[in-house]
Image: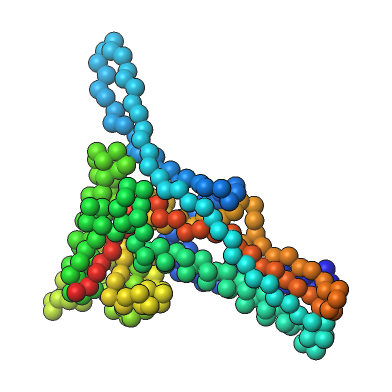
Amino acid sequence: SKLLGNTAGKSLRRAYEEEYGSHEVWTGVVEVPDFKEQSLVQLSEAPELDKIKEGAEYKYGSFSDAGMTFKIDKYGKLFSLTYEAMINDDLQAFTRLPQAFGKSAKHKEADLVYEVLTGNPTLADGKALFHTAHGNLVTGVTGLTVSALAEPRSMMRKQKGVNNKAPINVVPRFLIVPAAMETAAEQLLASLVDPSKSNDTTNPEFIRGLTLVVDSRLDAVDEQDCYLAASPSQVDTITRAYLSGAARPHYETREGWEIDGMQVKARLEFAAVPVDYRGLVKLQFA
């Protein structure tokens, strides 16, 4: 039974690791020690350096911070196989069922990340993630074109840091679109010339350098919304939080006594946390 349990656990984790998750491409990762309320703190940029005259003293500067509080949640499911089912299936079920639950864990993560992206939650400053006051919402877009992405690119560039003093030059790296816009987005990003022009106007390097992220979860909310996102290495946008030291997903096995067979429990500790609006821009089409 221990061999069966090990086989199931390895298969479950392998399926989780191999399952593609579009949410992983553009989000950051953090681990937390427990289920208590946590805080993801954004530290401001360093204070401006002063000119120091000969013999003059240095002045102290200060940092400011902002952040979101959150708790990770626990998700899980039990599944079992009878002794007869295991024998009749030549143990293949212990490969197929764990794989299915490994993929299910990855799907749950993606569901929660895109629920945050499309749900437009309220941040610590009392404003929605996408808000005109945050300078990251563009409405009335008429098509997925070079000119349509120019404004949100500029808006992201002009975002100021936590201390609201100087622009931090956030660079868009990802174009996140619903499946309904996938082909148009591919054409735009792959073209050497601007598809909206009748001449050979060069397609900007900025456009061709974007990484396309497609997820049909967006279609279920609105087929006409897409997003630009910065690299999580530059600005935290939505962060995936896991329980430190826990397998992703964790599994346990138990051999049946009253009923011959094996039970496997899959568990995932996870939270999708909206951290900073500065690395995201939403485009709403007319």
The location of residue 119, given as percent across then percent down, is: 37, 65
**185 relative to 216 in the view: left or right:** left
Quarter of the image with the C terminus is bottom left
Total marks in image: 0
The location of residue 250, given as percent across then percent down, is: 66, 62
Of residue 189 and residue 92, the one placed in the foreground of this image is 92
Q: Which residue is depicted at the point 31% across and 31% down?
A: 47
Q: Residue furthest left?
A: 198
Q: Which residue is depicted at the point 52% across and 47% down?
A: 37
Give the image's coloring scheme: rainbow
Of residue 270 and residue 206, the one placed in the foreground of this image is 270
Residue 99 image-quadrant placement:
bottom right
Residue 10 image-quadrant placement:
bottom right
Q: Which residue is depicted at the point 56% across and 48% down?
A: 36
Q: Inspect this view and state whether residue 267 appears.
A: yes
Q: Considering only vertical position in the picture, is 286 above or below 51?
A: below
The location of residue 213, given as percent across then percent down, is: 39, 70
Q: Which residue is depicted at the point 43% across and 43% down?
A: 41
Of residue 176 and residue 80, the one placed in the foreground of this image is 80
Q: Inspect this view and state whether residue 153 appears.
A: no
The location of residue 29, given as percent across then percent down, is: 50, 54
Q: Residue furthest bottom?
A: 88
Quarter of the image with the N terminus is bottom right
